Image (cartoon, rainbow, N blue to C red):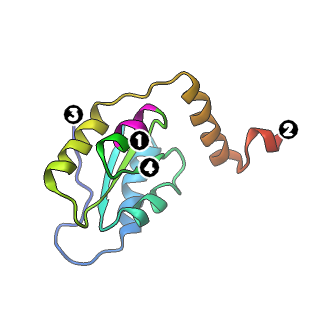
Amino acid sequence: MQVEDAGPSGDESVDYPDYAATVARAVGSGRADCGVLVCGTGIGMSIAANKIPGVRAALVRDVHDAEMSRLHNDSNVLVLGADGAEPEQVRQIVRAWCLTEFEGGRHARRVEKISDLERRGKTRNEAE
C-alpha cells in the first residue's frame, strides 16, 4: 500500500477545507483509491470532502461505523475527529475501515442513487 501525506507539517492552525479538497480531489479523480482525513471534530472535513464529485466521505466514530460505511455505502474517504480520540481506538477504526470491502448487492443500487444525486441533483423518482 502506498501512502501520501497531504496534511500540514506543523501544529499551526490551518484551513481544513483546503486539506479536505486536496485529498478528496485525489480520490474523486481516481489518482488515489481512498483517503483519510482528520480534524478536531471531523464534521467540517466531511462536509468539504463530500462536495467533490466521486467522493463518499464518512465521519466515523467507532469500528461499527467504519465497517458499515464500507459495507453499505462504499465510502472512499474516512473522516475522523481527533478531539478526545484514544489512539488505540483510532487504530482499530482505521484497520476496520481498510479491511472491510463493499458488500454490493442491494447496496450497489443505493450507492448508484447517491451518484445520481451528485450528477443530476435529483433522485430517480424525482426525475421520472
Q: CA distance from mark 4 to mark 3?
A: 20 Å
Three-letter code, disc 2: Glu
Tell me the residue at 48%/45% (across/down): 56
* CB-based contact (under 8 Å), mark 1 and mark 2: no
Report the residue marked by disc 3.
Answer: 1
Tell me the residue at 33%/52% (across/down): 61
Q: Residue 72 appears at what percent x and percent y?
A: 48, 33
Q: Is residue 56 above or below residue 11?
A: above
Quadrant location, the N terminus: top left
Kindly state the secondary structure of the residue where label 4 is placed: strand
Of mark 1 and mark 2, the one earlier in the sequence is: 1
Residue 45 magenta: no
Report the residue marked by disc 2.
Answer: 128
Q: Label 3 neighbourhood size at 10 Å, few (<14), some (14-19), many (20+)?
A: few
Q: Residue 125 appears at what percent x and percent y?
A: 79, 39
Kindly state the secondary structure of the residue where label 2 is placed: loop
Q: CA distance from mark 2 to mark 3?
A: 43 Å
Q: Nearer the viewer, mark 1 or mark 3?
A: 1
Report the residue marked by disc 4.
Answer: 57
Give the magenta range.
66-71
Q: Nearer the viewer, mark 4 or mark 3?
A: 4
| Residue 32 visible in rendering | no
Q: Is residue 79 above or below residue 41?
A: above
Quadrant location, the C terminus: top right
